[in-house]
Amino acid sequence: MDMSKEGPSTEVTVSFHALHRARHTIQDFVLSYLPYHGLSLVDFLKWWDVLVWVEGTIYAMDEGNEELTADMLGSEPGNGGVVQVDPSHQGFATIRGVLEGLGLYSAHVADELKKGLEYWEGERRLCAAMAAQPCIPKGGSAMLSTGQLHAVSAKKSFDYRVLHHLLCGLCGIERNNVAPLFEFLALDEWLVDIGDDLVDYEDDVLRNSFNIYRGYVHIFGATAPLELARHIGELEGQHAQALALVTHAQRRAFLKRKDAAAEGPGALRWVMPTPILDEAAYRSQ
């Protein structure tokens, strides 16, 4: 791809703020995912421009989506409170153009980017519903379903999967040859996202952001911790089964990274925050 020509590669899609926010994801991706394929930081430096730019552009779009959900608080938007965003958003259009020029826009990458759009659409829809009912009955509400929450939550880490598919394309790894690894990581990513949601719960209530625990509180009220713990237990069972199907080297790389993560305070523990049953009152405080 000739970068000197006009085209997608010359379009500006990311701010320094978005790149700064993407730094943690890039660091985690390099330390966690490259070892699965026997790669190192030296290998990352060969392709850092593609991986960092894609992740930064995704973060820039995520910031725009977060602004839309925050704007739902105290407003009465039309269309059921859901603000629609054109699927041909400049960011995704530019990502596609650049990756096509590099020969990296595979069907797998396209599918994960599509899931990203579905995640943001689902986030806006669920956050609009939760913002419309800030006072939650102690026994919960039937306005949402766990199926809706799970469908959105499972897509939250679409950016990791985009990066992973790009990594495979950059170093010539066939996706079908590592299918068990992708299936395992999808479950691992989901569990990590749930753990992050538990840590960020209060902040996400303030911002009106999607959070699976927040959704469980809206559905189940005071019993949300028990219900989410049941879901986590089911995922952990599937996670253990999927881990047994990856290669020995991949399993060793995962356990090594897990041990390193466990050194942080409170890591690898499920701590359920106290359910907030009156979100409006919580925000006013």
Image (spheres, grey):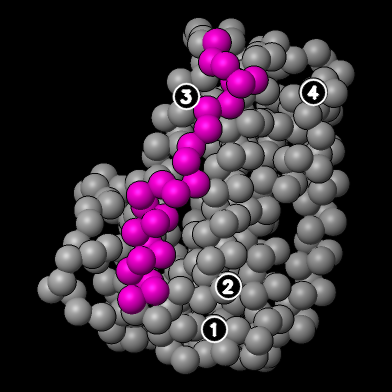
Q: Residue at x 45, y 34 (%)?
A: 66
Q: Name the residue under label 1.
A: 36
Q: Residue 50: give its label.
A: none
Asked whether 90 falls inside the magenta stretch, the response is yes
Q: Is mark 4 on a helix, strand or loop?
A: loop
Q: Residues within 10 Å of mark 2 (few under 14, many from 20)?
A: some
Q: How crowded is mark 3: few (under 14 residues within 10 Å), some or many (20 or more)?
A: many
- Whether 223 is drawn above or below 229: the answer is above
Q: Earlier in the sequence, mark 3 or mark 4?
A: 3
Question: Residues in magenta?
Answer: 76-101
Q: What's the amino acid at mark 4?
A: Met
Q: Mark 3 points at which residue?
A: 70
- Front: mark 1 or 3: 3
User: From this viewpoint, which residue is outermost toward the front?
Assistant: 6
Instruction: Compare residues 83 and 268 and report the one nearer the observer.
Output: 83
Q: Quadrant of residue 210?
A: top right
Q: Earlier in the sequence, mark 2 or mark 3?
A: 3
Q: Residues within 10 Å of mark 4 (few under 14, many from 20)?
A: few
* Residue 281 at x, y percent in the picture: 58, 8
The answer, for residue 104, to whether it is visible in the render is yes
Q: Residue 143: give its label.
A: 4
Total marks drawn? 4
Q: In which quarter of the image is residue 82?
A: top right
